[in-house]
Image: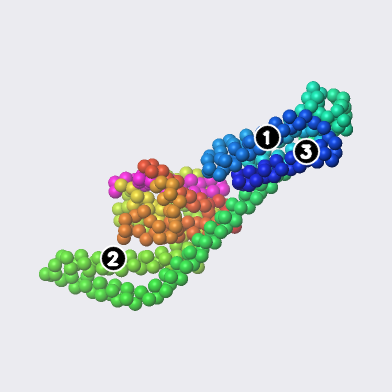
Amino acid sequence: MVSAPWLVRFRWAVVGGVAVALVVGWVALALRFDVRVVVTLVTTLIASNAWLAWRVAADRPLGLGLEVIALLDVALLTLLVLATGGPSNPFTIMYLVFITLAAITLGARWAWIVTAASIGGYGLLFVEPLQALVDAHAPHANFQPHASHQVGMLAAFVVAAVLTAAFVTRIRAAVEARERALADARRVAAQRERLASLTTLAAGAAHELATPLSTIAVTARELDLAATTPGVPAEVVEDARLIRSQVERCREILDQMSGRADASVLDPPAPIDAAQVVREALDSLPAGAPARVRVVVSGTAPPLQLPRLGIARVLGTLVKNALDASDPDAAVEVHVTASPTALQFAVRDTGTGMDEATLVKAGEPFFTTKAPGTGFGLGLFLARTFVEQWGGQFSMTSRPGAGTVAAVTFTAREAAS
């Protein structure tokens, strides 16, 4: 979209162009017109642009200012053309410029409004009572009200105006769609680069930590077995089991960082059974957690070819996050909605929700709203990356106090590609 400062500069150029054209017409071409009317119109143009420049410089909201300016430009052009030659004035071509500018700056709706205003303004040039403002020596000054030449000129202008508005609005829509596609492609590329960096980091960390973690795990197991003998304090038993659980957590973190939520040769795409995916996701939860999950399935899933284990891991991540965000006794809902062309998994929690700033950051690597030590900030990032790599859509909606809904959607067309 063209910015307001650019529009200010463009309108100053228009003011200069109008002034030069009027001077040249008066001096070099001996055209005569009512100077008072013309000066009043040009002064109005200057005043309106000075107001717009002031609002822009002061960073004040414009509201419908740009839309009003666009209609004002059409009105001033109509009056200037009436006062300086009527339909014979070659500057009637400026109507098409204003239509193009409206299509670029204001969008399709206002482009058509400005087009209608321009057609109406151009039509006024042929109204006989208004031609009193036109120079009597102009080539087209004295028209017959229904002359075929007038009708032809008006018809040609209407066609040109409509085609200009349609063409420019289509171009703008195509450019915006292209920009959105490029932005999405850049975002996906950035995600893949970050995932590759995490994988490389995790591979190095796993290589370096494999031996000490294995040693700690073996030692902790021996301590756990030794602690079962009579007379060993209960605290020792708990400490040994805590060491083992923390070792497993370290391995889990390394697994997440290495991107194992992504598809691999061990998880090839296959026809998806939504019910089986949900069961596997719930089986991955801690003991007692599945009882808090309410599953609602509706519809018949399309024949999608996707990595089943990867989808189950993604769904398990979303359900675990929802359980962590909700009260300990609150339920989490999983809605599986299927149609002949799409399959969606939506997980709804009853937590505190997120504000807009937090929602924007959700899914970035190493960003988490959980308490320190309870979350690594990679689950949502890996889930989103996996879903988008397989042609799906990942979305989150949330409001403070209203909980959060995380949705994963695959369509038959996207999955096939």
Secondary structure beneath label 2: helix
Secondary structure beneath label 1: helix
| Near-viewer residue (369 or 381) | 369
Residue situated furthest front in the rendering: 27
Q: Does the image show residue 96?
A: no
What numbered label is drawn on residue 245? 2
Mark 2 vs 3: CB contact within 8 A: no
Q: Is residue 232 left or right of residue 221?
A: left
Inspect the image, locate mark 1, and give the three-letter code of the amino acid beneath it: Thr
133 in magenta: no
Calculate the distance from the C-alpha at mark 3 to the C-alpha at mark 1: 14 Å
Residue situated furthest top in the rendering: 129
Mark 1 vs 2: CB contact within 8 A: no
- What segment is highlighted magenta in the picture? 328-353
Percent coordinates x, y for residue 358 in the rendering = 41, 50
Give the mark count. 3
Tell which circle, 3 or 1, labels the residue nearer the N-terminal end: 3
Calculate the distance from the C-alpha at mark 2 to the C-alpha at mark 3: 86 Å
Inspect the image, locate mark 3, and give the three-letter code of the amino acid beneath it: Leu
341 in magenta: yes
Q: Compared with residue 74, is residue 245 higher up or lower down, i.e. above or below?
A: below
Tell which circle, 2 or 3, labels the residue nearer the N-terminal end: 3
Q: Residue at x 35, y 74 (%)?
A: 209
Inspect the image, locate mark 2, and give the three-letter code of the amino acid beneath it: Ser
Kindly report which numbered mark, 2 or 3, lies closer to the viewer in this rendering.
3
Percent coordinates x, y for residue 332 in the rendering = 37, 47
